[in-house]
Image (cartoon, rainbow, N blue to C red):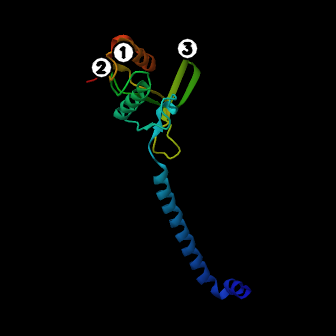
Amino acid sequence: MIEKLKEFFNPKNQKKNASNLVVLLFAGAIVLLLSNYFLGKKNDTGKSTLNGNDNGLREGYVFNSTEESYADNIEKKLEEILKKIKGVGEVYVMITFDDTSEKVPVFNTTQTVEKTDEKDAQGGTREVTREDLSQQVVVGSGGDSLMIMKETKPKVRGVIVVAEGAEDIEIKEKLYSAVKTVLGISGNKVEIYSSK
């Protein structure tokens, strides 16, 4: 082993060793880049939980950020919770929305105000104010996604619930109240029907 080290540091072999070292460093860099690329793809699922939590209705339920996925997520969660009401069998829910969700990005705002007093030859003075305002959208650490300050979800236009057991007026009223409470909407936007 000591002989190998002496041979490595021998001035005659330094050019050969330097070129081997450069090749080795280059190969290591390629391996790091490739591993980062493939590991990064595995960890990027593109999914998140609804509003950061699931309101206790269904653990681990996730959705993509598209509007259809959002609607599907709400419908499925509502179906799951309504099935748990005593006397209710199979439940189907359809929700329609007025508009789409809106995402407000984070801005880095810089404002400068410059005031100067100018005197003219006749002895008069005037104040000159110059304002500069610049805004830049803040992006995430990867540089490929915007940082979002807030996201407003679309408003519910109407809900239809078709449920086994809804022919009973008491169960129908429980379903009606549950939908109004969960979605925070008025009663004229909810219709409950019994299934075949």
Q: Position of residue 5 (x, y in %)?
A: 70, 83
Front one among 108 and 86: 86
Q: Quadrant of residue 152?
A: top left
Q: Residue at x 72, y 88 (%)?
A: 3
The foreground one among 10 and 75 is 75
Q: Badge 1 local density, few (<14 within 10 Å), some, or many (20+)?
A: many
Q: Is residue 30 left or right of residue 13?
A: left
Which one is closest to the eye, mark 1 or mark 3? 1
Q: Earlier in the sequence, mark 1 or mark 2?
A: 1
Q: Are marks 3 and 2 in contact (CB under 8 Å)?
A: no
Q: Position of residue 185 (x, y in %)?
A: 40, 15
Q: Is residue 123 left or right of residue 3?
A: left
> Are the residues tagged 1 and 2 within 8 Å (C-beta)?
yes
Image location (x, y in percent) of residue 7: 68, 87
Give, as a three-letter code, the residue at label 1.
Lys
Query: Which quadrant is the C terminus positioned in?
Result: top left
Q: Earlier in the sequence, mark 1 or mark 3?
A: 3
Element marked by disc 3: loop
Q: Circle 2 sits on which residue?
A: 194
Question: Residue 106: in sight, yes or no?
Answer: no
Q: Residues within 10 Å of mark 2 (few under 14, many from 20)?
A: some
Q: Residue at x 41, y 36 (%)?
A: 65
Mark number, residue 172 = 1
The residue that mark 3 highlights is: 122
Where 40 falls versus 180 (above or below)?
A: below
* Structural distance between the alpha carbons of marks 1 and 2: 8 Å
Q: CA distance from mark 1 to mark 3?
A: 86 Å
In the image, 159 versus 42, the foreground residue is 159
Instruction: Locate residue 158, reporting x and y percent.
Output: 33, 19
Identify the residue at image location x=51%, y=58%: 36
- Quadrant housing the N terminus: bottom right
Identify whether 5 is placed above or below 135. Answer: below
